[in-house]
Amino acid sequence: MEYTQGQLGRVFVARLYDGESIYTAVEEIARKEDVAAGVVLAVGGIRRGAVVTGPEQTTGRVVPHIEEFDDARELVGVGTLFPQDGEPLLHFHAGIGRRDTALVGCPRGGMAVYLVLEVIILEILGARARRELDPEFGVHLLNIYK
């Protein structure tokens, strides 16, 4: 285990509108406001997307298993925001449901808000961490620096 210490900085509250992407919005706020690290909370509706619900296999390079949907669903999610290649990158996981069907995992590109999505960004100051490509698994993982 590795860890770094930080402290809470600013708090941002955003309302995303129908059709917007949480990834685009959060990363745009982070760039505009110079947020290097943070925690992201989200609640609201989602109309379409693709969700990684785990790897296809549990060994070797990661090949994601993806479930797609294209209808109005409820979403509650949490994520982290850290730099990757010098740019803010959101890593987000959510529970997404409609009626008696639910997906839990990591939503990917193409995700679009249904009606409204409320997002809170809690800035973390002083945390020494960034995402870097892990050559063994082929994914970007969080690395801690002292």
Image: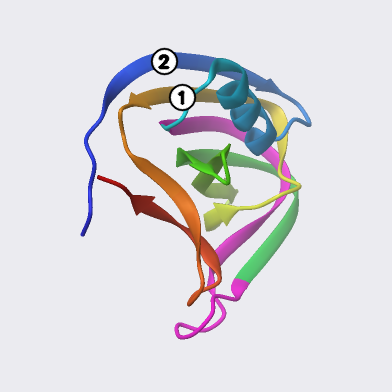
Q: Which one is nearer the viewer's eye here, 69 or 127?
A: 127
Image disc number at residue 11: 2
Q: Position of residue 4 (x, y in %)?
A: 24, 41
Q: Front-most of 72 and 65?
A: 65
The disc placed on residue 121 is 1
Viewed as shown, does residue 56 lie left or right of 134?
right
> Is 24 rendered above or below residue 111?
above
* Residue 100 visible in the picture: no
Image quarter where the N terminus lies is bottom left
Quarter of the image with the C terminus is top left
Residue at horizontal 56 percent and vertical 39 percent from the top: 86
- Residue 134, image x, y percentages: 48, 67
Going from N to C along the chain, the mark reached first, 2 or 1, is 2
Contact (CB < 8 A) between labels 2 and 1? yes
Amino acid type, mark 1 = Ile
Main SS, magenta region, reads strand
User: In the drawing, what numbered circle is on residue 113?
Assistant: none
Q: Residue at x 59, y 29 (%)?
A: 26
Disc 2 to disc 1, C-alpha distance: 6 Å
**Residue range highlighted in magenta:** 38-64
Provide residue 21's location: percent of width, then percent of height: 71, 35
Q: Of residues 3 and 54, which is closer to you in this image?
A: 3
Indicate yes or no whether the magenta region holds residue 60: yes
Disc 2, SS:
strand
Q: Measuring 41% from the left and 53% from the top, which residue is drawn there?
A: 142
Q: What amino acid is at disc 2?
A: Val
Q: Is residue 97 left or right of residue 70?
A: left
Q: Is residue 13 visible?
A: yes
